[in-house]
Amino acid sequence: MPLRRSLAFITAISAWSALGLQLMLLVGRMTADGASVVEAVWRFFGFFTIIMNLMAAVVASAMALSPGTALAGPRSRLVTAAAIVFGGLVYSVLLRAIWQPTGWQAVADHALHDATPVLFFLTWLAWDHGGLRWRDALWAAVPPLAYCGYAFARGAADGWYAYWFLNPEALNLKQLSASIVVLTAAFLIIAVTLIAIDRLLVRRDVIRPASQSGSRSL
């Protein structure tokens, strides 16, 4: 197995393991408080962090096992990389200082917010480059917009919102709109940055063989 597919396999195992551990912890905690397993699983899938890690797990698995499929293609890798990098950055900048879990919850948190983002980004770097266009950054807007609609539908059904900035019961329409715009813009900025990196890597790979050929001709 090539090195890059091995890295994708490690990333997939890390992501699936982190998701499994977090699900087990949440089910244990909520059922201890009287909730059902179904309610715990429903709550589990309400978090954007879980959705992003699930995306990373699925796409990394495709990269390792079926690299020629669309799920492992350039756009899919870009969207997933933007999502998981966003999650890692937000956690590091806004949440790490105020949320200090211990025990197995700390293990799950570091796996979801540190290990998987870093591993997926390294896998993305190791993969083929040159298949992206600037307009492909627009695909990165799909996950945040889809999640916002999903979060509002869930909240309307059970009254629970995972994040205060997407809670229509606490914010007015202007504030909610601002949250959606900022969230989507952040994804687009990260996607554009990744495409810029993609182009730099292609340029490096083009220049290097040319320079080596010139050296041999001297």
Image (cartoon, helix red, strand yellow):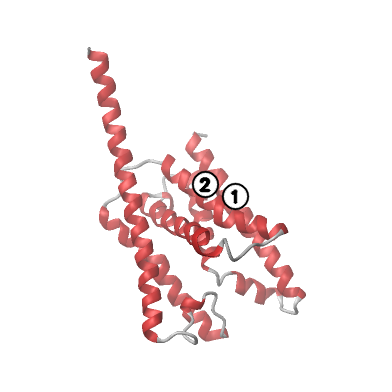
Nearest the camera: 202 or 172? 172
Relative vertical location of residue 132 with respect to residue 83 in this rendering, above or below: above
Relative vertical location of residue 117 with respect to residue 46 in this rendering, above or below: above
Dot 1, crowdedness within 10 Å: few (<14), some or many (≥20)? many
Place residue 96 in its image quadrant.
bottom right
Q: Position of residue 107 (x, y in %)?
A: 66, 55
Asked whether disc 2 touches disc 1, contact meaning CB atoms under 8 Å apart, the reply is yes
Residue linked to disc 1 = 14
Farthest residue, direction top: 218
Amino acid type assigned to the residue bearing label 1 in the image: Ser
Q: Position of residue 164 (x, y in %)?
A: 51, 78
> On the rendered image, what quadrant is the C terminus found in?
top left
Residue displayed at 29% across by 21% down: 212
Could you tell me which secondary element the residue under label 1 belongs to?
Answer: helix
Farthest residue, direction front: 97
Residue displayed at 41% across by 68% down: 144
Relative vertical location of residue 23 with respect to residue 74 in this rendering, above or below: below
Could you tell me which secondary element the residue under label 2 belongs to?
Answer: helix
Q: Position of residue 23 (x, y in %)?
A: 66, 64
